[in-house]
Image (cartoon, coloured by chain):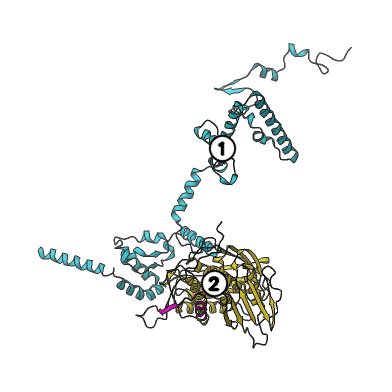
Chain colours: A yellow, B cyan
Amino acid sequence: MAAGSVIQYSGHKCFRHRLVLSILSGKPVKIHGIRSDDKNPGLRDFEVSLLRLLEKITNGTVIEISVTGAYVSQGTATGLLCTKAGTAILLKPGIIAGGPLVHDCPLSRSVGYFLEPVIMLAPFAKRPIQLTLRGITTDDYDLSADLIRTVTLPHLQLFGISDGLELRIKKRGAPPGGGGEVQFLCPIVKQVKTLNFVESGKIKRIRGISHAVRVNPQFSNRMIEAARSILNRYIPDIYLHSDVYKGEESGKSPGYALSLLAESTTSVLFCSEATSKPGVAPEDIALQATRALLSEISKGGCVDQKHQSLVILLMVLGSEDVGRCRMSQPTPQTIQFLRDIRDYFGTYFKISPADPTKPDSSDLLYSCYGTGYVNANRDLA
Amino acid sequence: MTDHDELLSILQVHGQNFLSSFEGSLGRGAFNKSALPVQFRNKEIEEEEDEEWQGIRSSSESESEEDFEENDDEFTAVSPSTSNANVIVFSDQVSISNREQDITTKYQGKAFMSSRISKLRENTSFDIKKTSEETDEDIKERSNVQNDALLHKLVHTQLLSGSLNSELELTPAQRRKALSGRIVELTGNAKLGRGERLVRTAEHNKASKRVREGLVQKQKERRAAQLEETKNLGNYHPSLKRLLDPDSETAKPKKRVRGLQMGIGSFKGGTLRLSRQEINSVQGQRNGMSGRRRGSGRGRRGRS
C-alpha cells in the first residue's frame, strides 16, 4: 500500500462498488462531495450502515467521515461513534476477516443493497462468512432475497464458488415495516476460475417465486395465473412457486411480489421482479414482472443487466488468462464500474461486437486479462 | 435387370445424400430457427417432426430420459461431434407416465426452493427408474434384524475402533493394544468389540500373583462404584446388567424352551409327558402329606 496511492472520487453514485474495489485491491479511497448540494447533505443512514457492515466484515479497516470540517477518526474495534451525515469519507482497507456476523439493516433499503457488496467480498475472506441480515427482504430498488438466491449466487458457481454457498430466507419482511431475516453462507476460495461464456443458447424453462405476506394468500395464486397467461404461449416448462409465509415469519407489513427467472440451454439466467404497490391489483403486478422478463430476454447476452458488475469483477479477479463473456449493452453503472476497475487494478476490457456477421445483434463480447488475484487472507489451517 | 440395379443404386445414393445433408451445422441451424415458431404453436406437429427426426438427436437435452428411449428409431445418431445446436424436446406430458413425471417435477421443485445453491439447478440427472427399483429391492433385502446386525458390525469395526483415529490422541501403547485387539477380532478369536479386552486380560495374566490379584480387586471395586453411581443417578435398568458387568456373560446361554407351554408337562411326539412331581402337585399325596396338615384338616375337628 504505497503512500499517495489514495484514489479520489466525488459524488455518491457507485458508492458500494468503490468501497468494494478498495477493500479488494487494498488501495485507500477518498470520496468527497457526497450530496453536497442536496437539502440533506452527506451520507444517508443506509450508507453509514453499510460502512458499519464493511467494518464488521473486515479487520483493520479505518473509516474516517468528515462532518463539514471536523474530522472524526475511528479505530478498528471501537466502531463508528458518529452517525451524523458527512460529505467526505476516507476508507483505509484492512483484510477481509469473515466469520459469523449479524447486522441489522435500516428500513430505508432492503437487505439486497447490503448483500450485494458482501457477495463480492465473501469468497476472498479469511474465514467463511456466515452473515445474518435483518430488515426488508423485498424492495423496489434492489434485488430481492429470492432473486439473489436463484440468480446472483448461481453466477458465483460459474467461477468455481459453489460448495457451501447458501442463502436461507428465515423470515420475510415487506416495506415499510421490515422484520425479515436472511442468512448468507459463503465458502472461501483461493482463486476464481477464468470465465469463458459466449454461448447464449435458447430459453428452455421459466421459474418463478410468488410470495405474499400478511395479505390474502390468493394474491399469490392470482399473480401466478396472470403471469402464466402470457408465458404459456412461449414455453411449456413453466413452474411458478407460491411461497406463503405465515405468522412470525411473515414480517411486520403486508405485501406481495413476483420474481421470475428464465434459464437457457447454456444455463444463462435472466430475471425480473415486481413488488406490490398500494392500489394496484396483483394481476397488474404480475404482468409488469412478466413484461420486464421478456424485455430482459430480448436484450440477450449471457448475463443480464443487473449482474454485469458482479461478473465483470470476478472476471478481473480471475487467473492470469483471457476471460471472455458475452453481454448486452452496459448500463451507466457498469460503464462507471469499468472505469473504476481501471483505476484500481489497471485492467482494461476489450469490448467488441459479439457477432460481426449480424449487424442487428446488440450483444457485445467483453474480454479481459485477469489479474491473478489470490486470496492471501484465507486461513490455511 | 442391370438397369433396375442401377436405378436402385442411384436411389440409394440419393437417399444417403439426403440424410447426410442434415448433418452439417448450417443446415441444422436453419432448420431449428425456422421450426421454432412452429414448435411453440402446434405441439402435435412438433412431436411428429421430432419422432421422424431421431437421427440427429445425439446431443439433445431431453426433458427426461423416457423420451429418448421411447423415440428410439432405426435412424440412430450419425455422429455427436458434428452437431452444434442443442435440441430440446418439449413433449406432450401424458407420454411420460404420471408417477415418474410427478417425481421429477416434485424433486425439481424442491431443489429449486432449497437454500443450497449447489442444489438449485440440479437437472433431471435424477434417474427415476433406478431409484424406484432400488427402493423395492431395499425393502425386500433389509429387514430390521439385518439392519441391527449391520449396525453392530459397523459400530464395532469402524466407528469405535480407535487405533487409526487421530482425534483420540492415544498413546503408542494404547494404539498397539487397540490394533492387536482388532486383529484378534478379525481372526475370529474374539467377538466383535471384545478383542481389546481379551488382549488386556491376557497381559494381566502375565503379571505376578500380587499384581494380578490387585488388578482384579481394583476392577471389581471400580465396577461396583460405577453400578452404585448409575443406581444413584436413576439411570439403572436390569437390562443394563449385561453392559455394566461383562464377565457375567457366560451365564447367559440358557436354552429357550420351544413350543407351547400348556403349564403342566411337556407335549412331545403326540404324548403329554408328566413327571411324578407334576402329578403330585395336581393331586394331593395321601400318606406323606397328611402329617403336615394342621388346622383345617379333614380328620381333625378341634380337640375334644
Q: Position of residue A237 (x, y in %)?
A: 46, 68
Q: Position of residue A306 (x, y in %)?
A: 52, 76
Disc 1 element = helix
Could you tell me if residue B182 is visible in this image?
A: yes
Whole-angstrom CA distance, mark 2 to mark 1, is: 53 Å
**Part of the protein shown in magenta:** A336-364
Instruction: Tell me if residue A345 is in the magenta stretch.
Output: yes
Report whether B114 appears left or right of B6.
right
Q: Position of residue B206 (x, y in %)?
A: 59, 26
Q: Which mark is residue B178?
A: 1
Q: Residues within 10 Å of mark 2 (few under 14, many from 20)?
A: some
The amino acid type of the residue labelled 1 equals: Ala
Report whether B294 appears left or right of A200.
right
Query: In the figure, residue A365 lies in which quadrant?
Result: bottom left
B9 or B231: which is nearer to us?
A: B231
Q: Position of residue B72 (x, y in %)?
A: 34, 60
Count the numbered circles shown.
Answer: 2
A202 or A226: which is nearer to us?
A: A202
Please tell me which residue is depicted at 66% across the width and 74% down the height of the picture: A49
* Vertical position of residue B271 compared to residue B37: above or below: above
Could you tell me if residue A281 is visible in this image?
A: no
Instruction: Tell me if residue B32 is in the magenta stretch.
Output: no
The amino acid type of the residue labelled 2 equals: Ser
Q: Which mark is residue A25?
A: 2
Instruction: Quarter of the image for the C terminus of chain B: give it.
Output: top right
**From the viewer's perspective, is the residue at label 2 or at label 1 nearer?**
2
A304 or A58: which is nearer to us?
A: A58
Q: Chain of mark 2?
A: A
Q: Residue furthest left?
A: B2
Q: Chain of mark 1?
A: B
Query: In the figure, residue B204 lies in which quadrant?
Result: top right
Disc 2 element = helix
